[in-house]
Amino acid sequence: MWKIFTLISESYRFAWNVLINNRLRTSLSLLGIAIGIFAIISVYAIVDSLERNIRSSVDTIGTDVVFVQKWPWGGGDGADGYEWWKYFQRSEVSHEDFKKLLNRRLNSAQYMGYAAGTKGTVKYQNSNVENASIEGITFEVGLIFSKAEQLEVGRYFSEKETRLGKPVCIIGSDVSRGLFGDKDPIGRSIIAFGRQFSVIGVLDKQGSSLVGESDDSKIFIPVSLLISIRGDKLSGSSIQFKAKENVSLELLKDEVKQNMRAIRRLSPRAEDDFSINESSIISGGLDTMFSAIGIAGTIIGGFSILVGGFGIANIMFVSVRERTGQIGIQKALGAKNSFILLQFLVESTLLSILGGILGILFVSILISVASLYSEFELAMSLENIFTGIGLSALIGLVSGLAPATMAAKLDPVDAIRFNQ
């Protein structure tokens, strides 16, 4: 073990001296491999950051929540593509559907809520927010998505307020800033649809969501009040179910489907005229999408690394040629083939790792600059760093194998005579 350590140590010392004594050549080689590592690791880092942000947005939907809606997520189940004309003919999931389901008392559901939305102009004194998203919800929606825990100030609806349709509202942070600026909005009244609504709560700022709309630009009111004002002029309606603890989502979906078909009075052979959606539909699509992006990034970055590897191999062949006489002297003094082989392998690997570190430094600079102009968080993970260094070491080892083997096989007498 000590002999191996000494051999590696001596090889490292020889390699380092060569790299230092040939600064220009070393710099060019470093730059070549650095560009390759920069290309592939920057793709990995950006894709990982994008995936992390999107999955975080998906998680807000809830992994134990089922949605009954008019439109399916993820493109539907049509073999010939998204059969939008079929879904377009469906009726929206109504508040009556919700009340009928509520009366049936589903055994698998812990909570069941209803939501529907519309657009409108909201005013406060001389300030207004055009085309605001106004969403009517039942009390249970807040329990399903823990709305009370997301409030910056104020409180959530009471069950009585949502049941009786009281003119109260909870607003997102962007709406609050647009209407009230730095004023405290709690207790103030806003006007929408010609009616006054008292603000009882303001939600924490979420930031832009990569999946659907952010609550920052929404206004929540009791759905019964919204229906009395707008009638059937609502869109995006959904019935939402949260599964009981230790109840599988499949069991909940089956029970919801059976009851919805009964409520809609569908014959056994008739297709569903509603869709049952869940977050796994989005997650499954994300797995496929990011897998494809990762493969594409690997191929594109792979070509850059390949070019860098060829550059290192070329430099190592030149190095062997320049040091042929030195190799002959080392062998004449008793150096074994393994020492010569290891000497050049360490040199090529060290050169490649230094280039990889430089490439990772370039990536960190890119991400730092891009984060200043991006709305979602960009970061380079430890996995990205280890991947970059590992790829660098592998490329250096493979690129230096042929030159190192050639150097190790040199005849000492011929090698000494080479430069004479």
Image (cartoon, rainbow, N blue to C red):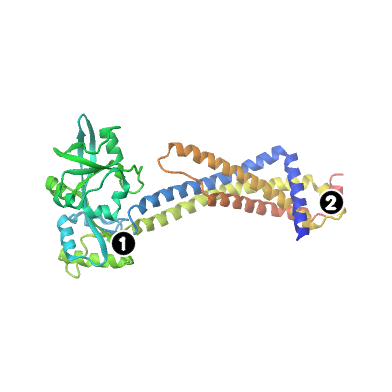
Q: Give how far across and how far down residue 89 sits, in percent.
A: 18, 55
Asked if residue 4 lies left or right of residue 149, the reply is: right
Examine the rendering and report whether any part of residue 238 can be seen. no
Name the residue tied to disc 2: 330
Q: Amino acid at mark 2?
A: Gln
Asked if residue 216 lies left or right of residue 336, the reply is: left
* Residues tagged 1 and 2 counted as in contact (Cβ below 8 A): no
At x 63%, y 49%, the residue is: 309
Q: Whole-Å distance between the Cαs marked 1 and 2? A: 71 Å
Total labels drawn: 2
**Image quadrant where one finds the N terminus:** bottom right
Q: Amino acid at mark 1?
A: Ala
Label 1 sits on a secondary structure element that is loop
* Residue 198 against residue 399 in the figure, above or below: above
Q: Quadrant of residue 218?
A: top left
Q: Give how far across and how far down residue 107 sits, in percent.
A: 24, 67
Label 2 sits on a secondary structure element that is helix
Mark earlier in primary sequence (1, 2): 1
Find the residue positioned furthest to the bottom. Answer: 268
At x 79%, y 46%, the residue is: 323
* Residue 375 against residue 275 in the figure, above or below: above
At x 43%, y 36%, the residue is: 373
Asked if residue 159 lies left or right of residue 284, the reply is: left
Name the residue tied to disc 1: 79
Examine the rendering and report whether any part of residue 301 can be seen. yes
Q: Give how far across and how far down residue 51 sits, in percent.
A: 43, 50
Q: Quadrant of residue 35?
A: top right
At x 43%, y 47%, the residue is: 50
**Image quadrant where one finds the C terminus:** top right
Find the residue positioned furthest to the top. Answer: 126
- Between disc 1 and disc 2, the foreground one is 2
